[in-house]
Image: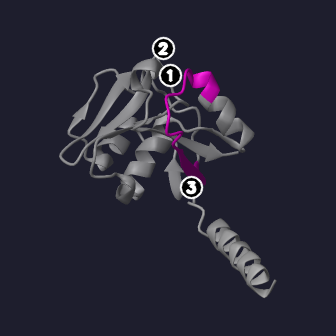
Amino acid sequence: MKKMSLFVVLLVALAVSAMGQEKKADTYKVMVDYDQSLDEAIKAGKYDYVSLLITSENFPSPRKDETEVEVRLFHFGRTISSNKEAIAEMDRQGYRPATLRELLELVTQHPEFIRKKEFFVLALGSTWNGRVPVLRSSSTRRDLVMRTFEYASGDERYLPAVCK
């Protein structure tokens, strides 16, 4: 009986310990100057390539203030069938999709989130003609491209979102 009680106590202790070691979501505090020109924000990110479609005409700033936001990188670890599915999950957790300007500031202020292997970060809060801005990053390059959600969805895709 004592062995059984000790076994139960050990199992409970392991379960509690495992709960405390749950992986924390990647979240970052980011100061966003919505009044800064898009060209300046892009220049600060030191990109190797920027799509000609990423312009202030296609992505005007909806605001003119400066504020701190909390950005969380959503990573579903599976293919998401639509941007609506991803946005609905963000919304359920109290977030909205990050805009292009918020993505640019995240990259500039927190370059450590860029990993060594190739991955994609989609700014679902900014769209132009059915496409979204995408940070395509690898160990040797940092590019800003435009892609449809379907093209850019998959296991190595991250979706930044801003706390509401």
| Circles 1, 2 touching at the beta carbon (< 8 Å) | yes
Span shown in magenta: 66-85
**Mark 1 Cα within 10 Å, few/some/many (few <14, many 20+)?**
some
Along the horizontal axis of the image, is 127 left or right of 119? right
Of label 2 and label 3, which has the lower sequence position? Answer: 3
- Quadrant location of residue 120? top left
Q: Is residue 35 visible?
A: no
Between 105 and 141, which is closer to the camera in this rendering?
141
Which of the labelled discs sits on residue 25, or is there none?
3
Of label 3 and label 1, which has the lower sequence position? Answer: 3
Which of the labelled discs sits on residue 130, or is there none?
2
Q: CA distance from mark 3 to mark 1?
A: 25 Å
Relative image position of residue 51 (x, y in whole percent):
28, 25
Query: SS for tag 1?
Result: loop
Dot 1 corresponds to which residue? 127
Count of numbered labels shown in the rendering = 3
In the rendered view, tell whether residue 104 sits above or below residue 13.
above
Q: Is residue 127 visible?
A: yes
